[in-house]
Amino acid sequence: MTESKNILIALKDRSEFKSIENQLIEDGFEVFYCQTGKSLLKSINKYSAKLIVLDLLLPDMDGIELLLKLKENKSLANCWIVFFTERSEDYSKVAGLEAGADDYITKPIKSRLLLAKIKSVLKRNKLTLKSDNSLLNKHGFTINRDNKSVNFNKKEIKLQKKELDLLSLFIEFPEKVFSRNQIKQHLWNGDLSISDRNIDVHISNLRSKLGKSYIQTIKGVGYKFLVSSK
């Protein structure tokens, strides 16, 4: 069966959609436009989209509320959700990621950059962490949960438990941006009493052991793991 290349795009300004539609169609995507949150929700089952891209400023529904509704929909388990945001709006980036979006695209929208971003998003593996697996081998890293070590570049490095959990999360979802609250959700079951400083320390320790170039800081948002260090 051919993999779906359907993309649902929700933008309040139809002219913005028209400015990117042709580029996506020329690259083989089936693109469907929604102008409101309600029309997007109604279109989900109809088009079986592989990717949903939405504006947080839709005329009928708060964008964060819409993201939460989308993440509650079990039929979208294998669908990536990306939102548009203004370049300077760090708070909307954080809020969108914490509401369950997989990534964001900054405005103004440029068709070629959007296409590159979409291709990048669709290449990522959307896998569920399996904490009962003692051995995880991905992207050149071999994590052994039994002896709390990681092998890469022909070296074995001992990690603390949370460092191990953090690295496991990152290599399961390479290139995905994680806010600090999302990291808390994965590593501490959403315990918000865990301070941001606590997470930053674990990140710093992991960088010192792996090399600084693997974990990138996204200013005002969080962190992401780069498959190939620079």
Image (tube, grey):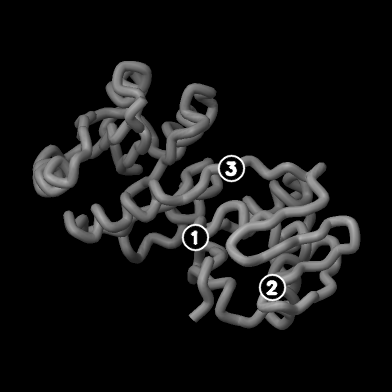
Q: Earlier in the sequence, mark 1 or mark 2?
A: 2
- Give percent across and percent down for residue 173: 57, 53
- Under circle 1, the secondary element is loop
Residues at marks 1 and 3 touching, judged by CB atoms closer than 8 Å? no
**Residue at which label 3 appears:** 127
- Give percent across and percent down for residue 106: 31, 59
C-alpha span from label 2 to label 3: 21 Å
Give residue 51's quadrant in the image.
Answer: top left
Q: Is label 1 or label 2 in front?
A: 2
In front of the other: 87 or 101: 101
Image check: 113 left or right of 14? right
In front of the other: 70 or 139: 139
Image check: 194 left or right of 69? right
On-image quarter of the N terminus: top left
Give residue 144's quadrant in the image.
Answer: bottom right
The three-letter amino acid code for the residue at tag 2 is Phe
**Residue at which label 1 appears:** 175
Packing grade of label 1 (10 A; few <14, some 14-19, many >=20) is: many
Residues at marks 1 and 2 touching, judged by CB atoms closer than 8 Å? no
**Residue at which label 2 appears:** 152
Packing grade of label 3 (10 A; few <14, some 14-19, many >=20) is: few
